[in-house]
Image: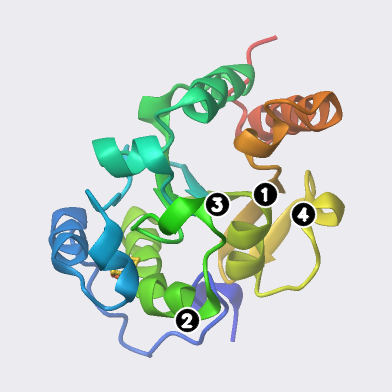
Amino acid sequence: MNANDQTAQGEPATKAARPRIPLDEIRAQVEQCRRCPLCDGRTNTVFGVGNPNARVLIVGEAPGKNEDLQGEPFVGAAGKYLNELLAIAGLVREDVFIANVLKCRPPSNRDPRPEEIELCAPYLREQTRTINPEYIVTLGNFATKFILKTDVGITRLRGTLQQAGRFRVFPIFHPAAALYDGKKREALENDFVTLGELLGTRKA
Ligand code: SF4
């Protein structure tokens, strides 16, 4: 089996590939979803946003307060910082697609629970199949561990090119974790330089 026969999570694909589900259809499923108890506390589901043909899929953890209120990922201070980081790589938001592992906000921004991740994961899997990016950029520990199926932490993996099935995976710190931590900021900014070089989008 070669890498093209696998999904992002390394699962074997069926011989006759399933047709890709249009993003609008996946979005409609998410909007109706009541698979886990997080549906009870949400204001909005946060499906994700961006270029449906993006070369880069950015995967975060879960919606926070502002994301839940607006139904969009990365809209607060971390979102503004993410825009600055994308610019370092020679990208704008419209170039990439941004989604989270969980589509509904955990109460008080607590960590996602394994059972919630398991129930919500099929949506991200379908988004990934449909967008079919070259690179998946994972933000922070939860997204990185989920996509790479690893217990190795983000501090060791950040800035190193990994592979999950046929996708190149580039783990980096979560921008929210780096906002007030100078060392993490420096690492994050260096990693976006590398990302721009990998993509060939970085301006000299
Ligand atoms: S977090 Fe995911 S699985 Fe849980 S209700 Fe929301 S969309 Fe459904």
Q: Which mark is residue 115?
A: 2
| Labels 1 and 3: the sequence-earlier one | 3
Give the quadrant of ligand 1: bottom left
Which is more foreground, mark 2 or mark 3? Answer: 2
Element class at badge 2:
helix
Please tell me in which quadrant of the rendered image residue 120 appears: bottom left
Mark 1 touching mark 3, by CB under 8 A?
yes
Label 1 to label 4: alpha-carbon separation: 11 Å
Q: Is residue 30 above or below residue 165?
A: above
Relative to residue 160, is residue 179 drawn left or right? left
Element class at badge 3:
strand
Q: Which mark is residue 113?
A: none
Label 3 to label 4: alpha-carbon separation: 15 Å
Query: What residue did someone put label 4 on?
Result: 154
The C terminus - image quarter: top right
| Labels 2 and 1: the sequence-earlier one | 2
Give the residue at x 78% y 48%: 158
Relative to residue 187, is residue 172 drawn left or right? left
Label 1 to label 3: alpha-carbon separation: 6 Å
Q: Is residue 46 above or below residue 77?
A: below
Query: What residue did someone put label 1 on?
Result: 170
- Type of the residue with mark 3: Ile
- Residue most extreme to the top: 204
Label 2 to label 1: alpha-carbon separation: 25 Å
Element class at badge 1:
strand
Query: What residue did someone put label 3 on?
Result: 136
The N terminus - image quarter: bottom right
